[in-house]
Amino acid sequence: MTRADWVIVISAVALLPFLYALYWGNAAPGDRVLVLVNGKQVLAASLATDTEFTVDGPLGTSHIKVHGGQVRFTDSPCANKLCVHTGWLQHGGEFAACLPNRVSLVVSGLNNRYDTINF
Amino acid sequence: MTTGTSPMTANRITQAFRCAVTLLAAALIVTACSHRPHEHHEQLVVFGTLVDITIFDADDKSIARASAGITADLNRLHRTWHAWETSTLTAINDRFAHGEGAIVDAEGMRILRRAQELSIASGGLFNPAVGKLIGLWGFHQDDAPKGPPPPAEVVAELVAKNPQMSDLTFSDTAVTSGNPDVQLDLGAFAKGYAVDRAIGIVRAAGIENAIVNAGGDLRAIGRHGGRPWRIGIRNPGGPGILASVEVTGDESVFTSGNYERYFDYEGTRYHHIIDPRSGYPADGATSVTVIHTNGATADAAATALLVAGPEHWANVARQMGIENVMLVDKGNNIHMTLKMAQRVQFEGEAPSVVIVADPP
């Protein structure tokens, strides 16, 4: 091989991580959670960082917790707390909602194991 | 290879440098031109549930059109077919209770005729005529009932009235019931119909790859770019995923489970899928998952097969023309058709599986 060939091979190999990051960079399971109010996205949070936050809907404030790559409602101003009972979400495509407060969560990512969840 | 900087070597280095620059430029151009596979999530609060729409590779305008269309149509269906809030359906039920027929529009006629066909095919296990029974159990309200269960003699009395979809007769514009105790509740059909409508609207907006998931039950068309759609089936009642299936083309995946709506009273759990033969919650299966092209059919079949239970589901599936079925019994054993077994992939530890051969 000529030196030119080597340069090409080395350049190609050097570019691989860049391409990998570009196309598969979000491949980790449980990428991020999208938080929607009235079906419109109000924020997106990484599931890689433990955090707690609140989102305001028409009824009041919903509390959301991210922990260990999972996300859940911890409280919401609704009567039956179905959203809280839904529990932890971690797989891409999983979702939970507080319908009375119009707040919903969906786990999303580019290379999820599942596109949606049937139950 | 020579060392030193002969003109030849310098030329080679220049050539190599050019190649590298070209390669880098090519990589950047490829990156710039190929947009990322575009997966879009749209969530709508309609039909008393959360409708999650996953769309692959469509422009924003089409997505907005589909989203607005689905919102309008599902709101309309919700108002028309609500089983306990004042609706076209409750008006029909009022007429039936008074021994009168009801004028129904063309879409209503199609829906009721189809529900009748499915009910008859299921041997009455999918029975949307038992609205009174569902109401008696307290499931005609948004919140879960608190109990106690209704008195046994009242349940028995309602069951003895034997309301059936076959009691309905259709003229061109009107439907009448030969049994005044028929009260329609399309709970195990309407969601499937709504998902079918939503997919129609998605297609009309020019979108070819999408999943419409209404509170857990879904219909998927097309594919996720270079691969099929991957559907996770949640463990009945528990966290985590039991199994997954791949779906391409056009298929609906519906699950009925005893964990969806229920109440606990004095240590016993009472769920919302009532066996129309006994008047009590269906006992025997925890969940049934059905895959079928048509959402309304899959919806009705999942309910009928849950009522049929682990002993009889295969016969009912055969009568209803359903080929892909997975039933989880109370002991967490899985029962499947051969067709379903060939496409289900279990996540984690493989459970005990009983495979039932498909009909010849």
Image (spheres, rainbow, N blue to C red):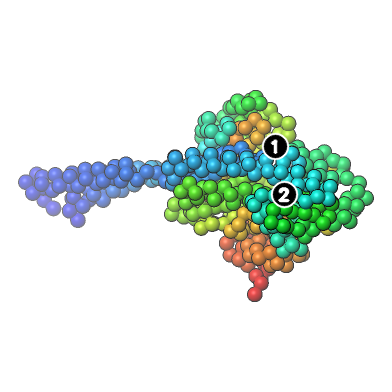
Residue B116: which disc?
A: none
Classify residue B207 as left or right of residue B261.
Answer: left
Query: Between B63 and B244, which is closer to the camera in this rendering?
Result: B63
Label 2 residue SS: strand
**Which residue does the numbered mark 2 point to in the structure image?**
B103
Comparing B99 with B70, the one in front is B99
Q: Is residue B263 visible?
A: no
Give the x, y percent position of residue B251.
57, 57
The residue lying furthest to the right in this view is B153
Q: Quadrant of residue B117?
A: bottom right
Are discs 2 and 1 located on one and the same chain? Answer: no
Residue A74 placed where, x, y %? Answer: 66, 31
- In the rendered image, the residue lying farthest to the left is B7
Label 1: chain letter: A
Q: Position of residue B356 (x, y in %)?
A: 68, 68
Q: Is residue B195 above or below residue A69?
A: below
User: Looking at this view, is B313 or B76 the one in front?
Assistant: B76
Disc 2 residue type?
A: Ile
Residue B223 location (% of width, % of height): 48, 53
| Alpha carbon distance from label 2 to label 1 | 38 Å
Q: Amino acid at mark 1?
A: Leu
The residue to which callout 1 is attached is: A82
Residue B306 vs residue B22: left or right? right
